[in-house]
């Protein structure tokens, strides 16, 4: 089943890579944001099924943006993507109630988390 996805990352190259990764399984990228503030605005207007969220961004980081999104919609499906060490952020990601954490460079892991998000519904 295809999902409507909002991609949040401060790197335009990474946003393009994630969008390309999501096409073959039939997911639809409904929006892209380069920081947490844009992510919150787009989430409220687009109501995506899933958000892929970078952690470190200017203006507002992904953790703060996710907290605000989850405050507005406790059922939001947020998957954090990062180049950083997962263990550093694991407790915070779990505290927020996010759906998962994956390395930006492990494509299969990202797709697996989206599929798992489908099963959780």
Image: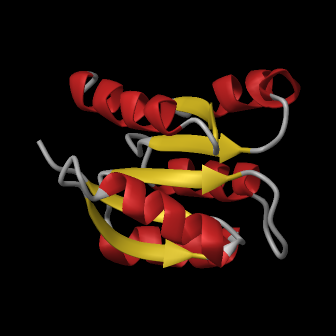
* Percent position of residue 21, x then y: 40, 53
Q: Residue at x 48, y 58 (%)?
A: 18
Q: Would residue 30 be found to the left or right of residue 92 on screen? A: left
When asked about the image quadrant of residue 98, the answer is top right
> Nearest the camera: 20 or 117?
20
What residue is shown at x 61% (from left), y 42% (from top)? 80
In this rendering, position of residue 39 left or right of residue 82: left
The percent coordinates of residue 31 (x first, y second) are 40, 75
In the rendered image, the residue lying farthest to the left is 1
Q: How is the image coloured?
A: secondary structure
Vertical placement of 4 versus 101: above or below?
below
Q: In percent of the image, x 41 and y 46: which residue is there?
A: 76
Asked if residue 108 lies left or right of residue 105, the reply is left
Rendered-image quadrant of the C terminus = top left
Res 97 visible: no
Residue 42, how many percent across, how many down?
46, 76
Q: At which x and y percent is residue 10?
A: 71, 71
* Residue at 38% across, 36% down: 111
| Quarter of the image where the N terminus is located | top left
Depth order, front residue of 77/25: 25
Instruction: Determine if residue 14 is in view.
Output: yes
């Amino acid at each position: 089943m295809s999902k409507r996805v909002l991609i949040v990352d401060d790197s335009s190259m990474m946003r393009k890579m994630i969008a390309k990764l999501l096409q073959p399984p039939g997911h639809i990228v409904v929006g892209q944001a380069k920081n947490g503030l844009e992510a919150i605005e787009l989430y409220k207007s687009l109501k995506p099924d899933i958000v892929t969220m970078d952690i470190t961004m200017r203006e507002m980081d992904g953790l703060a943006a996710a907290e605000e999104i989850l405050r507005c919609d406790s059922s939001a499906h947020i998957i954090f993507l990062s180049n950083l060490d997962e263990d550093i952020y694991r407790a915070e990601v779990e505290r927020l109630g996010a759906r998962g954490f994956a390395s930006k460079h492990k494509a299969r892991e990202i797709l697996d988390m989206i599929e798992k998000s489908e099963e959780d519904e």
